[in-house]
Image (tube, helix red, strand yellow):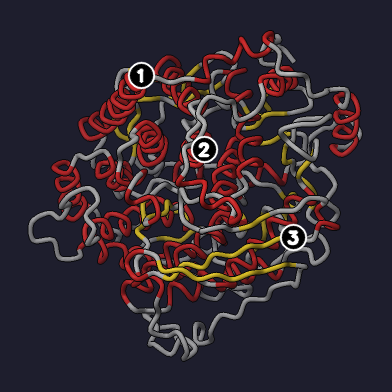
Amino acid sequence: MFDYSILLKPKARRHPTSQALLDTFLSTKDNFTAIDNSSYYGKQYDKYLYFSTNERLRLLDESKKMFQFAYDNYMKYAFPLDELDPIHCCGRGPDVEKPDNININDVLGNYSLGLVDSLDTLAVMGNTTEFQHAVKLVIEHVRFNRNITIQVFEATIRVLGALLSAHLLIIDPLQPFGNLAPSNYNNELLDLAHDLASRLLPAFENAPHDLPYPRVNLLTGVVSGMRNDTSTAGAGSLSLEFTILSRLIDDPIFERVARRAVNSLWTKRNQITGLLGNVIDVETGEWLSQSSGLGAGIDSFFEYLLKNYILFGEREDLNMFDEAYEAIYVHMRKGRANCKEGVGLHPMYVNVNMHTGAVSTTWIDSLQASFSAVQVLRGDINEAICMHALYYSIWRKFGVLPERFNWHVNMPDVNFYPLRPEFVEATYFLFQATKNPFYLHVGRDIIENLNYYTKVECGYATVHDVNDKTLEDRMESFFLSETCKYLYLLFDEDNYLNKQGANDYIFTTEAHIIPLMSKLRKKVWENDGFSSPPSSTNENLFSLPVNYETKTIVLNKKKKQKSAKNSLETQVVDVNLDESATQKSLTAVPNMIINNTRKLNESSCRFQPIERHTLPLSAALLFQLDEMVGVHSSRSP
């Protein structure tokens, strides 16, 4: 869990400004030129051109063993507590002695988090028997009527999302992973999800700007005296899970409050740059951190705008995503215009001031790596390839990803690596989009390094310092729900999600699997202003429909409709942003379903053989990128 207060603390500067540093950085590295793909450069990268079936199957088995080793030890040594301490082989729950220890208490709530977060990973890996057993354990042991304060965002993406995903997989008529229903299953997971979400609702009550308070006590509601600062992601990334719940139980209250929070943040963006800040005060509505980026504190806000459109078909979500993506490209993207050729610095997306667009920091963080997956989903494959390549060079430099990497000195700003999944996620999405064996090699590097650096007696441990590989005794639940799942799917060529079901499911930001079903694209309150009775007693507070405010941008829109499976209507939109604003023609949102990621004018390519023996970037550009990051240089700053 990232402590957003770090963003509020001024740092001593050895240099004038981050913008000046970037200007110097760009000017000194502009002499990088695109070198011919000579044999000298090519030999270093020849290994990426091929990948044997036997090796893929070996790594598929290895990725499954990784999860099973970590999960089995969690169940043996930690359950029913929330997390496993993998070095000392014991369980971990909330830090009751230090209530202000939000690094722990934001996440852990005495609700068997490790088990709940693992449910759909068990299903994906084909362990039907253990899935059914795990569901029974959740039904028997997990309760939310506890006097404990947790973070709304973490509880939503980890617990609420897991419960909804497992329930939807159980009732999914396609049964992609077999009959998952335990005997006598009677929607208990949905009932638990409803109970949890109802206990999160007080975060929205008496919120003057429709932004939820970041933390609630599951028994008593919002605790007076708690911090009012929340991140953009924390307030604006609840909409997918909350809307799923509303549409499953035909109660608009959850969708309404989550969408109002998104709308509130959207209206607070800078009207000139189109950028949002990172941290906001929920009571004053003022931005506490005006730094805008793609990493911690804001990443899933953009992700959910796009995925909300895919899942629910709400045009407002797509409009907001289009505008946000344009602002990101115009203000955050630095480096040469064409990633795959030309002169200049390899492209990267930097943190900037939301009001001016000036560079605000000299670091990028590991959570930003997931934006490549968003770009794949959008159909912007080349940009995704380039961002991923940068993070792969950083991975190769240190063996794992530091939480923050300072691109000015080519060293970490924050040194730990808590087994995060974002880089793995991007690797999986890019392989599904390109089928390039390069990404299987990346996956192998990830598995080998996780086993070499982080595997301990009872699981996988957080890397305390990427420089010396010292460890911390913690294995967060996202290692089970995301990191292991994406690694397994990367190598499981025949998994239903990678073949027949490629167009039928999306992943939440915690990698929980959600089927695209007609039930989720309908709401009984569609045309009556949310007239259905709210489940909250605060009826007046939540009585009005949501109205999004969107800014007009220059778009060339061509709408197409086509019928998808399960009677879903999926919008296919060709969007070209104004070239005068972006200096590049961007094609946005092709078929908005995972794996069907080609641009419209190339959509037939998904049915044609894909050349597997070329690098996603030329060997010369990969070499240049390694030199820029300092992969082969000393690690001393």
Q: Which residue is mark 2?
A: 434
Q: Nearer the viewer, residue 151 or 243?
A: 243
Which mark is nearer the camera, 3 or 2? Answer: 2
Question: Are discs 1 and 2 less than 8 Å apart at CB?
Answer: no
Residue appearing at x 31%, y 23% in the figure: 62
Q: Nearer the viewer, residue 35 or 402?
A: 35
Above or below residue 258? Residue 349 is above
Q: Nearer the viewer, residue 95 or 133?
A: 133
Q: Secondary structure at mark 1?
A: helix
Residue appearing at x 62%, y 76% in the figure: 548
Above or below residue 87? Residue 361 is below
Q: Which residue is mark 1?
A: 55
Amino acid at pointer 3: Leu
Residue appearing at x 45%, y 70% in the figure: 202
Q: Nearer the viewer, residue 631 or 468?
A: 631
Q: Position of residue 355 (x, y in %)?
A: 83, 57
Q: Secondary structure at mark 2?
A: helix
> The C terminus is located in which quarter?
top right
The circle drawn on residue 444 is none
Q: Earlier in the sequence, mark 3 or mark 2?
A: 2
Q: Which residue is mark 3?
A: 577
Amino acid at pointer 2: Thr
Q: Position of residue 556 (x, y in %)?
A: 71, 67
Q: Secondary structure at mark 3?
A: strand
Q: Earlier in the sequence, mark 3 or mark 1?
A: 1
Q: Classify residue 9 as left or right of residue 77.
A: right
Crowdedness near tag 3: few (<14), some (14–19) or many (≥20) residues, C-alpha within 10 Å = many
